[in-house]
Amino acid sequence: MAADWLADLEEFGPEAVESACREWRRGQSKRPTIADMRALCKETASPREMQQLPPPPDYAAIERARQRAATKRQRTEEAYAWRQRFAEERGFADFSEVIDYGIVRASKLPLV
C-alpha cells in the first residue's frame, strides 16, 4: 500500500506532500484516502512547485514498451533456436559453422 501511495504522490514535491500531511493531521480525525492527499497536495503546492512537477508517468505506455521488449526477446530466442536446429540437422555444431562452410550467406541484417 505504501508503494501505491508513493506512486500516486510522486508528481508532487516533498514540501507539498509534507505540508498536506501536516494540514490533514491538524484538521482531520480520520485517515485520509489517496484522493484526499492528492487534493491537499494540489492546494498546498506553490505555483513554483507545480511548474516543476513532471507529468505523471504514462503507465499504459510503459506496459506497452515492456510487452514489445518481451516479444522481441521471445522472437530473438526463437530465431537462435531455429538456427541451432538448422545447423544440428545438417551435422554442424552451431550456425557459425554453417556460415563458414558456405551453406548460407551471412548478412548484416538481423534474422528477427
Image: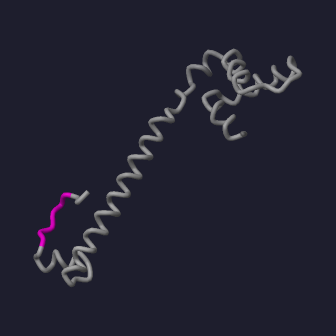
x and y percentages locating residue 30 in the rendered image? 86, 23
In the figure, 8 relative to 98: above or below? Answer: above
Residue toward you, 25 or 30: 30
Q: Is residue 102 magenta?
A: no
Which residue is pictured at 35% across the width and 63% down the height? Answer: 77
Provide the major secondary structure of the magenta segment: loop
Which residue is pictured at 22% across the width and 83% down the height? Answer: 92
**Residue that sits furthest to the front in the current view:** 89
x and y percentages locating residue 74 in the rendered image? 37, 58
Q: Is residue 105 magenta?
A: yes
Which residue is pictured at 13% across the width and 80% down the height? Answer: 101
Q: Total of numbered circles in the picture?
A: 0
x and y percentages locating residue 53 in the rendered image? 57, 25
Quadrant placement of the C terminus: bottom left
Quadrant placement of the N terminus: top right
The magenta stretch spans which residues?
104-109
Image quarter for residue 98? bottom left
In the picture, measured across the screen, residue 44 lies left or right of residue 28, that is left
In the picture, measured across the screen, residue 78 lies left or right of residue 41, that is left
In the figure, 17 relative to 80: above or below? Answer: above
Which residue is pictured at 51% across the width and 35% down the height? Answer: 59
Residue toward you, 79 or 12: 79
In the figure, 79 relative to 27: above or below? Answer: below
In the figure, 1 relative to 71: above or below? Answer: above
x and y percentages locating residue 56 in the rendered image? 54, 29
